[in-house]
């Protein structure tokens, strides 16, 4: 049900202009993050990420449930959801934006891209320009991005005792695959 609601909301957000426009949904999308400090490294992965791409206007939307991040340590996962990201209060994170480069969606190849939009984490929306790579193939489109997030910029409070275990900048990686219909 949440997936259907997201797709419907994304259609509205991505401004589908005609019935003939082909909206692509992700068939495989994941987000991971990595926090590196001298005392402890923290890594988590979310393989239940939803994404939509509108090649007609270069718009892209990515959304994830924060509680779906999986950690190697269940205690880390519990602290992440309850103490930091507060996933009951702020259940989702998202990015909605437009790919800036003019793309020939019918031409296979790998292209560097930037997308300007809004990153919403922990209920705090910030304008961001993300860089990535777009790989166009006959049967799929792969979009990858790497960027950093500062917890403080999204009002995520880190207790003083934990500041040595959680990086001031978290490395985020996204990999989204869109299948093309034949």
Image: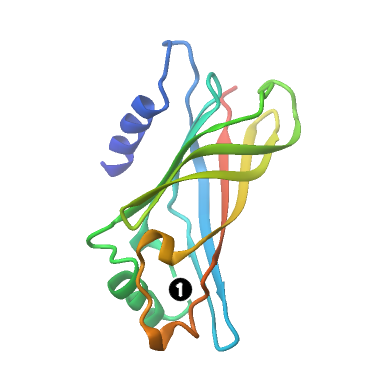
The vertical placement of 78 against 169, above or below, is below
* Figure quadrant of the C terminus: top right
**Residue toward you, 95 or 177:** 95
Q: Which residue in the protein does label 1 denote?
A: 71
The reply to whether residue 119 is in sight is yes
Q: Give residue 60's position: percent from left, percent from top.
A: 50, 34
SS at mark 1 in the image = loop
State left or right for residue 143 relative to residue 161: right
Tell me what residue is drawn at x 43 percent, y 66 percent: 151
Q: Quadrant of residue 19 in the image?
A: top left
State left or right for residue 85 relative to residue 56: left
The vertical placement of 82 against 69, above or below, is below
* Figure quadrant of the N terminus: top left
**Residue toward you, 130 or 61:** 130
Tell me what residue is drawn at x 28 percent, y 36 percent: 5
Q: Give residue 178's position: percent from left, percent from top.
A: 56, 36
Q: Quadrant of residue 113 in the image?
A: top right
Residue furthest toward the left? 89
Q: Give residue 119's position: percent from left, percent from top.
A: 44, 47
**Residue toward you, 137 or 44:** 44
Q: Give residue 24's position: percent from left, percent from top.
A: 50, 29
Tell me what residue is drawn at x 50 percent, y 20 percent: 22
């Amino acid at each position: 049900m949440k997936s259907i609601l997201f797709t419907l909301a994304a259609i509205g957000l991505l401004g589908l202009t005609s019935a003939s426009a082909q909206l692509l949904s992700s068939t495989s999308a994941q987000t991971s993050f990595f926090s590196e400090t001298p005392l402890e490294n923290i890594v988590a992965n979310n393989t239940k990420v939803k994404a939509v791409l509108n090649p007609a206007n270069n718009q892209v939307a990515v959304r994830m449930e924060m509680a779906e991040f999986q950690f190697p340590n269940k205690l880390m996962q519990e602290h992440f959801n309850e103490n930091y990201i507060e996933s009951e209060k702020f259940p989702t994170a998202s990015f909605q934006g437009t790919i800036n480069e003019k793309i020939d969606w019918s031409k296979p190849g790998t292209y560097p891209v930037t997308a300007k939009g809004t990153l919403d984490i922990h209920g705090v929306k910030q304008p961001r320009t993300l860089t990535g790579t777009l790989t166009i193939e006959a049967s799929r489109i792969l979009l990858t991005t790497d960027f950093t997030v500062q917890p403080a910029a999204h009002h995520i409070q880190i207790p003083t005792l934990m500041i040595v275990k959680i990086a001031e900048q978290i490395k985020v990686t996204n990999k989204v695959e869109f299948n093309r219909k034949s």
